[in-house]
Amino acid sequence: VAWALSAVAPACFSVLAGNRAIGLQGVHSTDLSRQSRSLRRATEVAEQTDIDVEQFEFQAEVSRVMDIIINSLYSNKDVFLRELVSNAADACDKKRFLALTESDAPPEPMKLRIKTDKDARILTIEDNGVGMQKSELIENLGRIARSGTANFVKGLEQDSSDVSLIGQFGVGFYSAFLVANKVEVVTRSFRDGEADKKSWKWMSEGGSFTIEEAPNEEFFGEQSGTKIMLHLKEEAQEYLDSGKLSDLLKKYSEFITFPIELWNEKVQYDQVVDESAPPPAEGEKPKMKSVPRSVYEWE
């Protein structure tokens, strides 16, 4: 997502997951092959969990915004979708510009995708725009340095600022916490060379955030992109409804020039033999019935 915030990295500390020691005591020759395979699997798992997780504190102004938004009684929470979709479109615009000015490779066709997971109560908004490097995650999703933002925050505290204007002050991303109690951002930057390309995950439940490498994360874009996963509050489950999302996207995408695809459930009907019907007479076809089947597709 293209972000327009300032750039001084806050202090951080690392938390390194420890690995369990693994040994091969008392291995019989007949079991060597099996133990060797087990050891390799255990080592692979250990390497996957040996990830450097860095924790950061939000800048004071961001913390104030977060506190206000998390505890907000603002009724028009739909604004979060407008802000995140707008940011995703900006990321695609920025990638197109960088491809023309700084890259030899043309950008892949760009678009936005929105998907829901009702069981996990997760709403995902993904783009294959410019993406972010680790330093940009720290700078853009942890600090505020735009003119007028301090006054906007002060107004929010005094109930004299309109939350719906949040995007005009460079803090639109944080509107995600109007509907989510945890937000994850996974991203891969268009600026990285192929040999240096890495994926990073930012995660916050408010108050602070963590960043770690995300080597196994999948993106629909081949070059770069950003995926925002909103773990919705119980009272925000309405945003898992594809009908509501479709209506909001029509409302907020008027000036978006990139396609927006919504993962939607459709019901199709299959014709199958009706096992409860009497057996067909000789020469007649068996009685059929329609059975509904859920089909998911991008549209």
Image: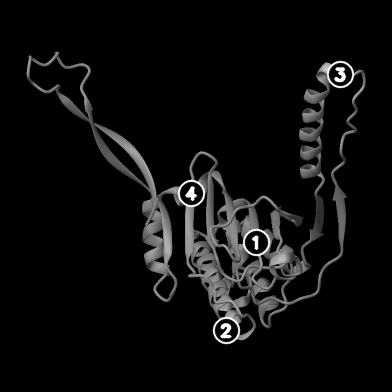
Name the residue: 61% across, 86% down.
101
Q: Earlier in the sequence, mark 3 or mark 4?
A: 3
**Can you tell which quarter of the image residue 47 is in?**
top right
Q: Element type at marker 2?
A: helix
For disc 2, the marked residue is 100
Residue at position x 77%, y 63% in the image:
58
Judge the density around disc 3: few (<14), some (14-19), many (≥20) Cα neighbours within 10 Å.
Answer: few
Circle 3 sits on which residue? 29
Closer to the chain start, of discs 4 and 1, is 4
In the image: residue 93, left or right of residue 264: right
Q: Position of residue 220 (x, y in %)?
A: 53, 58
Residue at 46%, 48% in the rendered image? 240
Residue 169 against residue 134 in the figure, above or below: below
Location of residue 292 by image quarter? top left
- Label annotation for residue 116: 4
Front label number (2 vs 3)? 3
Alpha carbon of mark 4 to alpha carbon of mark 1: how far? 19 Å
